[in-house]
Image: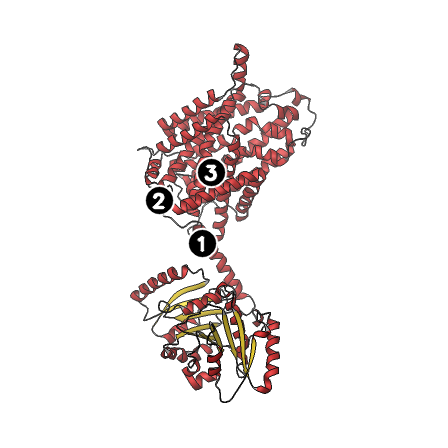
């Protein structure tokens, strides 16, 4: 569904995207835990963390830049991009999880903001003899004030406040960089690997520090309020990612040369001791955390507003309530109220450490999804995908793989919980939503390209008789009367072969006949779609059955292989329908095709328990194909309990020779036919083969008989008649003898 009602924009430029992202990147972790990282793994190890983290963030930023320069990005930021690429259902599953992460992040940053008042608490307690320790007296009023700011004034005032706090943040960093210590003055040379004894492992430190690098997508959430999202999102996001990476490298170096590893680990506010004016660090921490909270409380409601506009929730009143914005600016007033209430609840709990790792999981899933979209779009080759900024497919793939890898490295338990949670949301939204496109939207293009490449490969590959498999085409106008031929095609195409079923429509090609063909193909797909078959179905309009056959045998197979077999079908109750098959037999033989004629009876295929194959002395060329067809049919699960039985009508003097030949063929072909299932029948001059078949195979579910081209010329339709006691029959004519390896 379109994002109706959220097309009004405040008109921000690129700066808000950059400042929202950079203020989230340079947040609480930078002030409180980066010294711990340098002290634990050394400067070299910290550089490794920065590089490793940016192997995720840079591909994600490039993916966002690519996607944003291809499509119009409406309100909802990351959710909008994902939902318009993967479909509403998948987008909703990720979007709801993303929203919860953003909403709870407001509480997380506000609690971290209260930590900046630690020195104030210490001073007040020492000066006035108080025992103040509960920092919720700071965090609760802060989150309420932020909420009121957003509800009353909206994003416009929020951006003005953001500029102020970002300014304070950079002033504190400048004060930190120009500061000096006795440790720095006495240092003779830089020790790249200097760290504490018995430190935490690299990945344990990485898991704690990684959230410092995850704010680069924060500005994307402002997409609905930007004048030109295609310009502002890529430039703002990439600039914040690169600037943040550079600043973190310098911070790591400054910490490494300014304090001993023990001091870096033990003192969370070690930056106060390094800065030229110590109190500026708590102020910078306050600025960083409140700016991150401010960014989150601007972005989260816009994600929720977009979810409501897409009607992903089952109650329409809820969707309408969440999608509602202010008349002039479309600020998500109702979504902001909901977000504020969630933030207040989590701030009241006072500790979101347990939830923080799950938040990181959801963000990582979002980043991985964005990288995956970019990667898939490279291979989908969709003509409508023409971004002005292009990432590389291997960069996007690296980002997606690393996201999954790091999730399990950080916390496998929370990763599984997060994935199960999102899977549950997906099935819930799929069940309640009108949209059913799910994962198919983006994967269709990829599957199309993969199919195209495979078909070309198969066509170019050398093929010999040793790799023979049926590539069958069937032409019939009787599908809706008698779907027997389609059933047979389903079995052939299940595992070993390829099948194309053409529903023949008699007539000349015109607007009316084409419209009829489109209606018929919809009916075909609807009926056959529930059978889980691998048959490609289509319609064919032609003025005569002969011209239809001539067209069909020239069509390429959907498999990429040439068509090598044609299947005709007729009703045994209406032998007059054999006329068209007989008339076109010579035409098909000229293409050197194997020909199968399926005679359908009222008994259909019975219980699919037995297949009888009949061999005759004059029909050895067809024998190998008949046995192979029996084996291919048995590969389908509907025939899994079936048994093949071979009957050979031979002259008395050839009995032992024929038996030995059949056994050797079966053993060489590794076919599931026991020698005890081979029965040799002595040929008698006064008894016809048809009488023998009628007597022996009257209870068979499928009887396979060979026929020769010469017999068709001499006897015509008589070749296929006279089997009144037998059920469904398959008549086989091989273009050449198939080698059973």
Q: Quadrant of residue 513?
A: bottom left
Which quadrant: the C terminus? Answer: bottom right
| 620 shown above or below 201 | below
Color style of the picture: secondary structure
User: In this view of the protein, which residue sits in the foreground, 201 or 71?
Assistant: 201
Structural crowding at the residue carrying mark 2, measured as other residues with C-alpha within 10 Å and reported as few (<14), some (14–19) or many (≥20)? few
User: In this view of the protein, which residue sits in the foreground, 382 or 729?
Assistant: 729
Q: Secondary structure at mark 2?
A: loop
Which of the marked residues, 2 or 3, is nearer the chain's N terminus? 2
Gap between marks 3 and 1, in whole Å? 30 Å
Which quadrant: the N terminus? Answer: top left
Tag 2 residue: 2
Q: Quadrant of residue 335?
A: top left
Which of the marked residues, 2 or 1, is nearer the chain's N terminus? 2
Q: How many numbered badges does the structure rendering display?
A: 3
Tag 1 residue: 444
Q: Position of residue 707 (x, y in %)?
A: 48, 80
């Amino acid at each position: 569904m379109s994002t109706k009602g959220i097309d009004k924009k405040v008109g921000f430029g690129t700066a808000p995207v950059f400042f929202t992202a950079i203020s989230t990147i340079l947040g609480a972790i930078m002030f409180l835990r980066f010294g711990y990282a340098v002290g634990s793994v050394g400067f070299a190890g910290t550089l490794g963390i920065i590089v490793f983290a940016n192997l995720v963030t840079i591909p994600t930023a490039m993916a966002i830049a690519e996607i944003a320069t291809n499509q119009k990005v409406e309100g909802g930021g990351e959710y909008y991009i994902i939902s318009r690429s993967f479909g509403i259902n998948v987008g909703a599953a990720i979007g709801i999880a993303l929203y919860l992460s953003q909403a709870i992040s407001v509480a997380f940053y506000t609690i971290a903001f209260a930590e900046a008042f630690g020195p104030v608490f210490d001073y007040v307690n020492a000066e006035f003899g108080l025992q103040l320790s509960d920092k919720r007296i700071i965090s609760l009023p802060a989150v309420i004030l932020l909420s009121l700011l957003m509800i009353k004034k909206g994003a416009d005032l929020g951006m003005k406040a953001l500029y102020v706090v970002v300014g304070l943040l950079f002033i504190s960093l400048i004060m930190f960089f120009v500061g000096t210590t006795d440790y720095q003055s006495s240092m003779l040379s830089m020790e790249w690997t200097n760290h504490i004894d018995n430190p935490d492992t690299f990945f344990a430190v990485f898991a704690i520090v990684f959230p410092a690098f995850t704010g680069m997508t924060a500005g994307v959430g402002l997409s609905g309020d930007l004048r030109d999202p295609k310009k502002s999102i890529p430039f703002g996001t990439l600039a914040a990612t690169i600037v943040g990476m550079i600043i973190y490298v310098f911070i790591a170096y400054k910490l490494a040369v300014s304090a001993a590893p023990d001091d870096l680990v033990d003192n969370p506010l070690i930056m106060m001791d390094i800065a030229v004016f110590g109190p500026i660090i708590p102020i910078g921490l306050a600025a960083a955390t409140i700016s991150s909270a401010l960014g989150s409380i601007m972005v989260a409601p816009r994600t929720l507003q977009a979810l409501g506009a897409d009607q992903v929730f089952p109650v329409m009143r809820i969707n309408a309530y969440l999608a509602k914005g202010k008349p002039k600016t479309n600020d998500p007033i109702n979504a902001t109220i909901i977000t504020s209430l969630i933030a207040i609840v989590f701030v009241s709990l006072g500790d979101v450490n347990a939830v923080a790792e799950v938040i990181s999981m959801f963000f990582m899933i979002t980043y991985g999804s964005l990288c995956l979209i970019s990667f898939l779009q490279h291979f989908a080759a969709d003509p409508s995908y023409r971004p002005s900024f292009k990432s590389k497919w291997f960069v996007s793939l690296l980002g997606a793989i690393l996201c999954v890898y790091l999730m399990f490295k950080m916390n496998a338990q929370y990763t599984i919980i997060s994935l199960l949670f999102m899977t549950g949301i997906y099935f819930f939204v799929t069940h309640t939503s009108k949209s059913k496109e799910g994962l198919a939207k983006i994967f269709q293009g990829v599957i199309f390209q993969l199919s195209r490449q495979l078909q070309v490969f198969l066509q170019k590959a050398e093929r010999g008789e040793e790799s023979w498999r049926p590539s069958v085409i069937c032409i019939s106008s009787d599908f809706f009367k008698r779907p027997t031929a389609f059933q047979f095609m389903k079995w052939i195409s299940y595992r070993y072969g390829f099948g194309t079923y053409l529903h023949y429509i008699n007539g000349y090609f015109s607007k009316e006949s084409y419209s009829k063909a489109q209606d018929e193909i919809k009916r075909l797909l609807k009926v056959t779609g529930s059978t889980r078959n691998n048959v490609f179905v289509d319609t064919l309009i032609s003025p005569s059955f002969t011209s239809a056959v001539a067209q069909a045998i020239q069509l390429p197979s959907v498999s990429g292989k040439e068509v090598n077999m044609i299947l005709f079908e007729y009703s045994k109750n209406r032998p007059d329908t054999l006329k068209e098959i007989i008339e076109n037999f010579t035409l098909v033989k000229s293409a050197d095709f194997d020909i199968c004629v399926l005679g359908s009876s009222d008994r259909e295929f019975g219980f699919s328990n037995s297949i009888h194959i009949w061999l005759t002395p004059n029909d050895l060329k067809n024998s190998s194909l008949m046995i192979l067809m029996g084996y291919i049919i048995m590969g389908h699960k509907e025939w899994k309990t079936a048994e093949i039985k071979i009957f050979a009508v031979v002259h008395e003097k050839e009995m032992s020779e024929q038996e030995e030949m059949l056994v050797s063929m079966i053993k060489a072909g590794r076919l599931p036919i026991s020698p005890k299932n081979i029965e040799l029948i002595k040929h008698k001059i006064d008894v016809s083969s048809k009488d023998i078949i009628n007597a022996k195979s009257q209870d068979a579910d499928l009887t396979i008989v060979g026929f020769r081209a010469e017999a068709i010329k001499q006897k015509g339709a008589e070749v296929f008649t006279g089997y009144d006691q037998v059920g469904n029959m398959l008549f086989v004519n091989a273009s050449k003898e198939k080698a059973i390896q």
